Each structure stands twice: as structure tokens, then as C-alpha cells.
Amino acid sequence: MPLAAFIIQAYGFEAYQFHPHSSCCRDEFDIVAKVPEGTAKEQFRQMLQNLLVERLQFKFHYEQKEMPIFELTVGKKGLKMKESAPDAVSTPEEFPWESAENTFEIGKDGCPVFPAGRGGRTEGRTCNRWTGFNVSMQEIVKTLSFHLGRKVVDATGLKGKYDIDMKWYIDVAWLVERLTPDQREQIGELPADLPHGPSLIHAVRDQLGLELTSKTGLGDVVVVDHFEKVPTEN
């Protein structure tokens, strides 16, 4: 696996902060490790961070850079997502997501269908779905930043927590245009009957009642200072 993938998983960098194809970190490594049963996601991240620092002497710092961002506000037609009940329980973020308990079906519209009372964020054939309970604006902003690949700034003024069930579709043709010739050959011909629907920006407006406005602003980007290409011994 490329070093960049380990770095992103370990530190949870946003897409706008650190690009997985960064020239600094394309070297590939094999890691064999045992993770204790019941390990939480943050504990696992700390383990990966310790591994990167101790074995590869990994060091980085942040720098501020002007970049395209999105400002998030309440839409002109008003908020559409429902505020959670005072005693609502947040959707647990289980680890690992790929466990057998977290399997889901794909509906006729190509979107994932979660069991009643369960939620998460995942992808279908061409459709993404996010179902969550007792979700804060901070979590919404972080999730939108991840999927949009841009920093999202919360200007809604909302302080509550919300129940969310939204879905948006991927423009497969647009993605294919940006693949290398080898990647296109692997995919082959696209089916003519691919499901289609709202983009993420339109889903945020129409399903959540929030508006994303493109602007320019400052964001923290990751600068890698050092790492060893040959891991140190255990």
C-alpha cells in the first residue's frame, strides 16, 4: 500500500490538505500487525501514527494556503433536515466498517439501504448514501469536506444536532474522462442504464436545506518534512 494511504488513515487528513498521489509518499510498504479486539477507530489511528513515527521517522507540519473553499449556509427555502430528539443516541462509528454486522443491500435506485435504526456512509454502484442520527454541524462539515475535496466553512449558525438521510449520485462519465488509458481499459464499456440523480451539492440543498457557495479562503495543507524509505528495525 502507498505510504500516502497509511498517512491519511493514521492522521485523518482532509482531501484538500493532503493528496493521496503526492510525490513525496508514493513508495509502497507492506504492514503486518495484529489489532486487539475491540480497538476503537481513534486508538487504531494512534497505533498507525506511532508506527509511522517510530519505524519511518515520519515528520510533517501545516502551512496555510489560499484555496477554493465552500461556505455552508442555511438555504433560502429553510432548513429541511430534522433536529434530533433531546434523548437521541448518536450513530455509532464502528470499527472496522467492513465487519459482517455492517453489511447492507443496494436498492433499485442503486443506493445503499441500511437496516432500520442503523446508519453510516457508504457507496453503491453509482450512488452514495449517508444516514446518521444526532449529527452535529461539525460532523456535517467534515463529511462534506471529505466528499467534495474542499474545505467547507460553517456559516449556518446552527448549534443543534440533526437526523440525516441523504443520497447523491456520482457522475461516472465525468470520472472516467479523468482516468488514465489503462484505468479506462480496466473498467471497459459503461452500461447505458446507469442510475442517475442529484449531485452532492444539489442533495445538500434539496435534502438538507443547506447551501454550498464556492469562494476562496485559507486552509491548512500538510507539508511532509521527512520520512525514511527503509524502515528501522523493531
Image (spheres, helix red, strand yellow):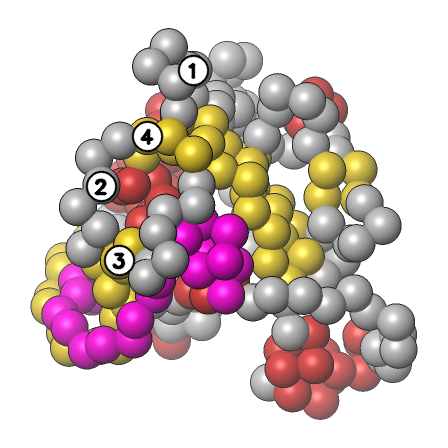
Is residue 220 located in the magenta-colored stretch of the structure? yes
Amino acid carrying label 2: it is Leu
Residue on which disc 2 sits = 158
Distance from Cα at disc 2 to Cα at disc 3: 9 Å
61 or 230, which lies in front?
61
Disc 3 from disc 4: Cα separation = 16 Å
Residue at image location 13% in from the left, 70% down from the top? 218
**Front label number (2 vs 1):** 2
- Name the residue carrying label 1: 89
* Label whose residue precedes the other's in the sequence (1 or 4): 1
Foreground of the two, 81 or 112: 81
The residue sitting at 29% across, 54% down in the picture is 74
Camera-nearest residue between 41 and 75: 75
Question: Can the viewer see residue 132 in this picture?
Answer: yes
Answer few, some or many: residues within 10 Å of disc 4's Cα (few below 14, many 20 plus, some between 14 and 19): many
Residue 169 lies within the magenta run: no
Disc 2 crowd rating (10 Å Cα; few below 14, some 14-19, many 20+) is few
Tag 1's secondary structure? loop
What residue did someone put label 3 on?
Answer: 73
- How many C-alpha atoms fall within 10 Å of the one at disc 3: few (<14), some, or many (≥20)? some
Q: Which residues are magenta?
A: 202-230
